[in-house]
Image (cartoon, helix red, strand yellow):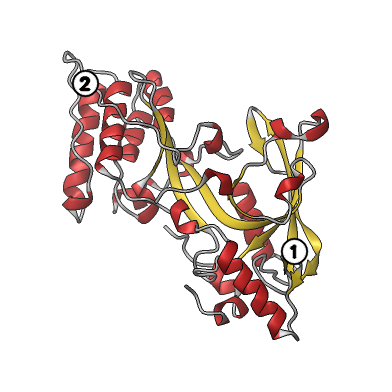
C-alpha cells in the first residue's frame, strides 16, 4: 500500500512515463452505454472524477494493456485474452496476426482481424452525477476506456498551452464530462471533455482541504477502504487453460494448407528467437486432415463479453511497430 505522502506528491512526470505493462467483480465495473441512455436520446451522459489508486497512486492510477477477443468457431467459446505484447513478450497471437496480414491473399488479410488487439486503460472513478443510473452516484467504480479518452487525459496533463492539470489530484483536478454515443456500431467519446473548473475531491461528504489535514486524511482512508482492487484488471499471465484456448482458436480459425503451415513455422521461429523459452507459447501444429478435439473451457465471470471490448478506436494493429516487435 502506498504511503499517504504519495497522494500529495503527484507530478506530471508520474503520468508521463512508459505505460504499465485474480478474478474481478463485475459489479465494480462502470459501463456507460448509449443503449441505456434515458429518454431514447442515444447519448449516455455523466460526470466522473478520476481517483488515484490507493495502492500506488504514482504508477498504478492508469493501468494499460492490450487484449484480444477470440472466438472459437468450432465450439463458439468466446473470451478476452490479455496479449503478452503488453509486457514486451513475444505473442503467438501477434505472430498469427502478422503472418495473415502480410499474406498476398485477401481472404487471409481479412482473417487477420480475428486476431486484432485492442488497447484498454483502467482507472478508478467517482460517479459524481449519472441521471441514467442515480443509484451509482457517490460510488467508487472501475472504468475501462480506450485511447481517445486516454488522449484527453494526456492532453490535460501535458497541454500545448496553459497550466497542466493532473485529473487524479486531491485538491485541484477537473471533473470529466462523459458523453457516449454510437458511431459505426461502436461507442464514441469525441464529445467528452474535462470541465474548466478545478475543484478539491469530495468523498463521503468530506472535502479535501489543504489547510485541514484531518479532512484530507479521512478522504484518503475512505478511498483506501472502499476502492475496488485495480490489480485484478492489470495484465494477467497466461494459464495452461488460456494457452490451450488460444492454440485451439488458432487451429480452428486458420485454414489448413500453405498459410497454416507457414503460420506454424513463423510461430516456431519467433519462439526460438525469444530470450526466455519458458515464457513462450506451445507450437501450434495445424493438421489439415485430422479433426481436432477441443476441450471444454468454461467461461468465467471474469471473461469480458464482445461488447465490453468495443471502443471507438478498437483496431490499432495497423499502427503496430513491427520492427520493435521483431526485436523482442
Horizontal side of residue 277 vs 37, given as left or right: left
The picture quadrant where one finds residue 260 is top left
In terms of depth relative to the viewer, which is nearer, 157 or 266? 157
Local packing at callout 1 (Cα closer than 10 Å; few below 14, some 14-19, many 20+) is many
Element under disc 1: strand
Q: Which residue is mark 2?
A: 293
Which residue does the image show at 52% across and 37% down from the upper left? 309
Local packing at callout 2 (Cα closer than 10 Å; few below 14, some 14-19, many 20+) is few
Numbered badge on residue 238: none
Residue 110: x and y in percent read: 43, 23
Q: Which of the two marks, 2 or 1, is nearer to us in this view?
A: 2
Element under disc 2: loop
Q: Which residue is mark 1?
A: 174
Residue 223: x and y in percent read: 61, 67
Examine the rendering and report whether any part of residue 58 can be seen: yes
Horizontal side of residue 71 vs 244, given as left or right: right
Image quadrant in which the C terminus is located: bottom left
Q: Earlier in the sequence, mark 2 or mark 1?
A: 1
Horizontal side of residue 291 vs 193, given as left or right: left
Q: CA distance from mark 2 to mark 1?
A: 54 Å
Which residue does the image show at 30% across and 39% down from the upper left? 242
Number of marks drawn: 2
Residue 178: x and y in percent read: 73, 48
Residue 323: x and y in percent read: 35, 49
Q: Is residue 282 above or below residue 124?
A: above
As drawn, the residue found furthest toward the top would be: 289
The picture quadrant where one finds residue 217 is bottom right
Q: Is residue 155 above or below residue 294?
A: below
The picture quadrant where one finds residue 14 is bottom right
Do the residues bearing badges 2 and 1 touch, measured as CB atoms within 8 Å?
A: no
Which residue does the image show at 25% across and 34% down from the upper left? 244
Which residue does the image show at 57% across and 49% down from the upper left? 28
Amino acid at each position: 500500500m502506498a504511503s499517504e505522502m504519495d497522494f500529495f506528491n503527484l507530478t506530471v512526470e508520474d503520468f508521463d512515463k512508459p505505460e504499465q505493462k485474480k478474478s474481478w467483480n463485475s459489479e465494480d465495473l462502470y459501463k456507460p452505454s448509449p443503449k441505456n441512455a434515458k429518454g431514447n436520446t442515444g447519448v449516455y451522459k455523466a460526470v466522473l472524477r478520476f481517483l488515484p489508486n490507493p495502492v500506488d497512486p504514482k504508477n498504478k492510477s492508469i493501468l494499460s494493456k492490450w487484449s484480444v477477443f477470440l472466438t472459437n468457431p468450432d465450439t463458439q467459446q468466446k473470451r478476452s485474452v490479455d496479449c503478452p505484447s503488453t509486457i514486451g513478450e513475444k505473442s503467438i497471437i501477434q505472430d498469427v496476426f502478422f503472418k495473415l496480414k502480410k499474406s498476398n491473399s485477401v481472404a487471409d488479410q481479412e482473417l487477420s482481424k480475428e486476431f486484432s488487439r485492442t488497447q484498454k486503460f483502467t482507472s478508478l472513478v467517482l460517479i459524481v452525477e449519472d441521471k441514467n443510473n442515480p443509484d451509482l452516484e457517490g460510488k467508487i467504480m472501475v472504468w475501462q476506456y480506450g485511447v481517445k479518452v486516454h488522449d484527453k487525459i494526456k492532453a490535460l496533463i501535458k497541454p500545448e498551452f496553459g497550466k497542466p492539470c493532473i485529473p487524479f489530484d486531491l485538491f485541484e483536478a477537473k471533473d470529466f464530462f462523459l458523453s457516449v454515443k454510437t458511431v459505426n456500431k461502436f461507442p464514441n467519446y469525441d464529445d467528452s471533455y474535462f470541465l474548466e473548473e478545478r475543484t478539491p475531491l469530495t468523498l463521503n461528504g468530506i472535502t479535501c482541504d489543504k489547510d485541514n489535514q484531518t479532512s484530507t486524511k479521512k478522504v484518503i482512508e475512505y478511498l483506501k477502504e472502499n476502492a475496488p482492487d485495480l490489480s485484478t484488471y492489470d495484465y494477467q499471465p497466461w494459464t495452461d487453460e488460456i494457452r490451450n484456448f488460444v492454440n485451439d482458436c488458432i487451429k480452428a480459425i486458420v485454414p489448413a494448407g500453405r498459410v497454416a503451415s507457414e503460420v506454424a513455422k513463423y510461430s516456431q521461429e519467433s519462439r526460438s528467437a525469444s530470450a526466455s523459452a519458458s515464457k513462450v507459447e506451445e507450437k501450434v501444429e495445424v493438421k489439415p486432415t485430422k479433426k481436432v478435439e477441443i476441450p471444454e473451457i468454461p467461461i468465467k465471470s471474469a471473461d469480458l463479453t464482445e461488447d465490453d471490448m468495443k471502443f471507438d478506436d478498437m483496431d490499432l494493429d495497423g499502427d503496430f511497430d513491427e520492427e520493435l516487435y521483431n526485436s523482442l
